[in-house]
Amino acid sequence: MLSYIQLEFIKLKRSKIFILTILGAIFPSFLLFLAEEFGEFSETITFQTFLTNVNMYMSVIFAILLFTIIISYLFGREYNEHTLKTILTAPTSRGKFILSKYLMFLVWILIITVVSSISAVLFGYATGATGLTANIVLDSFKELLYCNILLFLSFSPLVFISLLITNMIPAMIGGAVLTFTNMIVESHKYGIYFPWSSPYLIASGEIAQYTNNYTISHMIILITFLIGLTVSYLYFTKKDIPL
Amino acid sequence: MSNNLYICKKYFTFVKNILHFDIKNYCAQLHTKAEKITARGYFMTEYVIETKNLTKKYKDKTVVDNINMNVEKGKIYGLLGKNGAGKTTTMCMLLNLASKTGGEILLFNNAPNQETYRKIGSIIETPGFYENLTAEENLKIISKIRKNYSKERINEILELVSLDNEKNKKYRDYSLGMKQRLGIASAIMHKPDLLILDEPINGLDPIGIKEIRDLLKKLSIENNTTILISSHILSEIENIADVIGIIDNGKLITELNKDELYNKLNKSVDFEVSDTGKAQTILEKIGMQEHIDYQIVKIKERENIRLYTNLNLRDSINEIFVRNGIKVQKINLTEENLEEFFTRIISTESEITA
């Protein structure tokens, strides 16, 4: 499986989408930096607040859009560039191939998490945020990592959709719809049942404002993952490969 | 006396040695033959691809209909058919890119598995490679999957398909011909035992077509590579294939080797005569029937007698015509070409189906 990940990295060489997603990971920190520069914050901001804000914007808005683009590119490009027939006849097991794509999606998410956290620290420093400690940075990183891993799980139905509709435009529209829905339900009591907004609520601890029972939200995410994984796996392994 | 005895003894030993050697040698030969018979089925043809009633249906439409195809080891098998005849779907099923609705596929005498597919190289329709990568990087990915990555081999194969000067160019900047060459490079890079090529010469210029044709023939002769090649271009199949399978409406109508094909091609003799009416009367008198044994055809505003049967008697018929005062200006022996044969076979099949 590791060699497949290595191959996925070769495929990303000179890829604009990869660079775009890295820039997307930096964007929330950059926006907050601009907000500070234009005097949006009346007081000197602390590192904790800066990093919390970055995590919130990242998890609720930007991650949804970025992950949709990543999924659509990772899975859809094999159809759009007609490479499936070449790779599968090399030969590669279809099951291994789709699972390696899932794994690559996770690796990509981890890269985004690291980039987002590093950029948050750098832009926080540039804004003159106070109270920088290793613990604050580490806690913020853990929170974003946990949230993104939960988001990775809840994105499996979108993998199925990207196998079904290989074009990137519907994926972008889907991503935008999810983002807006997230923005609406995130601060609502129903946010804990929505598998794309609950990861942030769980990871940040804000879920405690709505319920003490975290299991339901975790179960919803897990069930969403299993349904998405099963359907996408079965679809990919059984369906004829378009030429 | 002793001298004679010595000679006799020497002669006896010599004969004994020869006999001993011959017997041993003969036994060894027999043993090898017996091994061959048991291991390979000495008198049986070895097939690399065998399909038994292979069928593919999409809802109500049957696109591949009970195909029984046999591709012999080391041969070039040309699958000939119109667009949409079922060639690509058949190949996709052989490569596990499409599932079969019915029937059986045997590759290398076994039900196909991952190991079987490792011995196959293929191109289905237009080649598919990563647009942002160079030829070298694309081949690197494929060879890494095949677990036989070698930079030297990649360079060697790119040189073979004349892409060595373009190896650092991104795939998206390649012309259609260059893409096709890269597809061929990828298919033959791992020295496969079987090549499945669907319209591999699409987009190639005449020189490129000749180069690829020569390369495939070389692979077949030197490496004993079995090749299944499909095309709708008759001349291409005729030039390259040892065996031709004609497919139409999902059905494999016929499988012929070159000799069988030439025997099946319709032949006729055209007599350009001064008086077709008189010639017709003579032919009727010697027992020939119009539309069965001969026909009157118009060629360039002139009526000719076209003879379909008894072609070996054309000298005698000519003699009879001349004796009866008919001037014979020209006698032409014509043979149906592959295109005419293909059209005839397809239309006969359509009439039967209708």
Image (tube, rainbow, N blue to C red):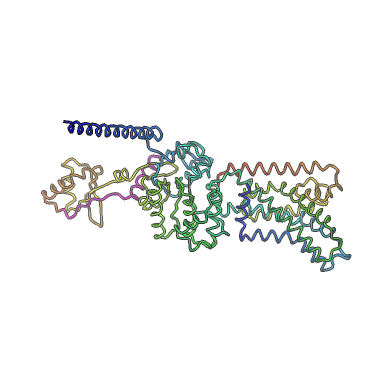
- Quarter of the image with the C terminus of chain B is top left
Q: Residue furthest front?
A: B2
Is B110 above or below relative to B279? above
Image position of B240 (left or right of B141)? left
Image position of B274 (left or right of B134)? left
Quarter of image, res B23: top left
In depth, the one of A147 and A224 nearer the eye is A147
| Residue A142 in picture, x, y percent from top left | 79, 52
Q: Residue furthest bottom?
A: A38
Image position of A138 (left or right of B204)? right
| Residue B163 in picture, x, y percent from top left | 47, 60
| Residue B283 in picture, x, y percent from top left | 18, 44
* Residue B68 within the segment the image draws in magenta: no
In depth, the one of B203 and A98 nearer the eye is A98
Is B341 above or below relative to A39? above
Is A17 above or below relative to B108? below
| Span of residues in magenta | B328-354
| Residue B39 in picture, x, y percent from top left | 41, 34
Q: Residue furthest right?
A: A43
